[in-house]
Image (cartoon, rainbow, N blue to C red):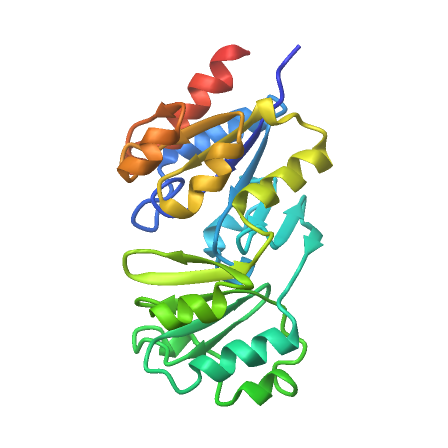
């Protein structure tokens, strides 16, 4: 009997590198799915911010998006927990007069403050006032926040009470407390009735930590930061060389 696994993949520098998916990753993902396993994106990006190349049912079974706040399986949304209007207005009032680039990442659209000039031609929505969350953007379902640059000590104190904050090298992001890549992964595996021992997570950076620790099998890309390699069961080759494919062959296909 073929073993079924649930495979959860980070996007940037894991499944994709330089905006492209190595062909060997596509081949091995399709083989794993053909043999009965499930393959999901598990990303900090909101669904609206996932590259269109990945919104292809022939490649993936679904998505854990927005740091665990938006779950989709077989083309249907099975769970969602967007930020409330009150939360959006509070956050917006803090950043609306800031000079940093900020994005309210949504399930269907993105709302920006000070968007980078390289993005402007493709941007439809720019926040002028936090009150617009009561009017223009009242029906937008926002999953999480992106802030280019670094959060200040005061901002960590202001938002750290209610949100999980992730500070990366060049940007920060935050989501409601209680959510994360691990929480979203667990909800999906429970929905599929797949034990955590048959859950494989792959990533490369700090915001992958919780899902890698929770999964039955954890895989770091060869290009992952040292801290991620240290906590994983296995380190594959670099993302651009098909690190995802190598891990799928090792843990899924070679056992069947």
Q: In which quarter of the image is the N terminus?
A: top right
Left-right relation of 136 to 157: right
Residue at the image point whose x is 37% and y is 40% from the top: 14
Q: In this view, does 97 lie above or below 184?
A: below
Residue 58, x across and y down, in percent: 57, 40
Answer above or below: position of 64 versus 177: above
Instruction: Provide residue 11's location: percent of width, then percent of height.
Output: 42, 46
**Residue 238, position as x, y percentages in the image:** 28, 33
- Total residue callouts: 0
Image location (x, y in percent) of residue 101: 36, 75
Mark yes or no: residue 97 visible.
yes
From where the camera sits, is residue 126 visible? no
Nearest the camera: 230 or 72? Answer: 230
Residue ID at (54%, 49%)? 180
Looking at the rendering, which quadrant does residue 37 occupy? Answer: top right
Q: Identify the residue at horizontal 51%, vertical 76% (top origin).
A: 91
Quarter of the image where the C terminus is located: top right
**Does 256 sit above or below residue 124?**
above
- Residue 184 appears in which quarter of the rendering? top right
**Above or below, 152 relative to 5:** below
Taking 174 as reference, is 195 left or right?
Answer: right
State the residue at coordinates (70%, 35%).
190
Closest to the observer: 85 or 3?
A: 85
Q: In this view, does 193 lie to the left or right of 222?
A: right
């Amino acid at each position: 009997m073929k073993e079924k696994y649930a495979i959860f993949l980070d996007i940037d520098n894991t499944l994709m590198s330089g905006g492209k998916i190595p062909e060997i990753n596509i081949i091995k993902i399709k083989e794993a799915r053909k043999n009965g396993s499930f393959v999901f994106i598990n990303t900090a990006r909101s669904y609206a911010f996932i590259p269109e190349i990945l919104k292809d049912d022939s490649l993936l079974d679904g998505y854990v998006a927005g740091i665990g706040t938006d779950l989709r399986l077989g083309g249907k949304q099975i769970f969602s927990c967007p930020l409330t209007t009150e939360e959006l207005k509070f956050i917006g009032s803090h950043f609306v007069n800031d000079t940093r680039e900020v994005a309210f990442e949504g399930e269907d659209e993105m709302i920006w403050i000070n968007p980078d000039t390289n993005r402007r031609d493709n941007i439809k929505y720019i926040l002028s006032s936090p009150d617009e969350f009561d009017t223009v953007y009242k029906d937008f379902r926002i999953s999480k926040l992106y802030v280019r640059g670094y959060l200040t000590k005061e901002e960590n104190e202001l938002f750290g009470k209610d949100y999980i904050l992730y500070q990366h090298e060049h940007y920060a992001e935050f989501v409601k407390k209680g959510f994360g890549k691990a929480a979203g992964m667990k909800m999906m595996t429970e929905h599929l009735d797949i034990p955590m021992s048959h859950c494989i997570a792959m990533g490369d950076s700090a915001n992958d930590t919780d899902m890698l620790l929770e999964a039955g099998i954890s895989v770091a890309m060869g290009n992952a930061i040292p801290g991620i390699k240290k906590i994983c069961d296995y380190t594959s080759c670099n993302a651009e060389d098909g690190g995802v494919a190598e891990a799928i062959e090792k843990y899924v296909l070679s056992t069947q």
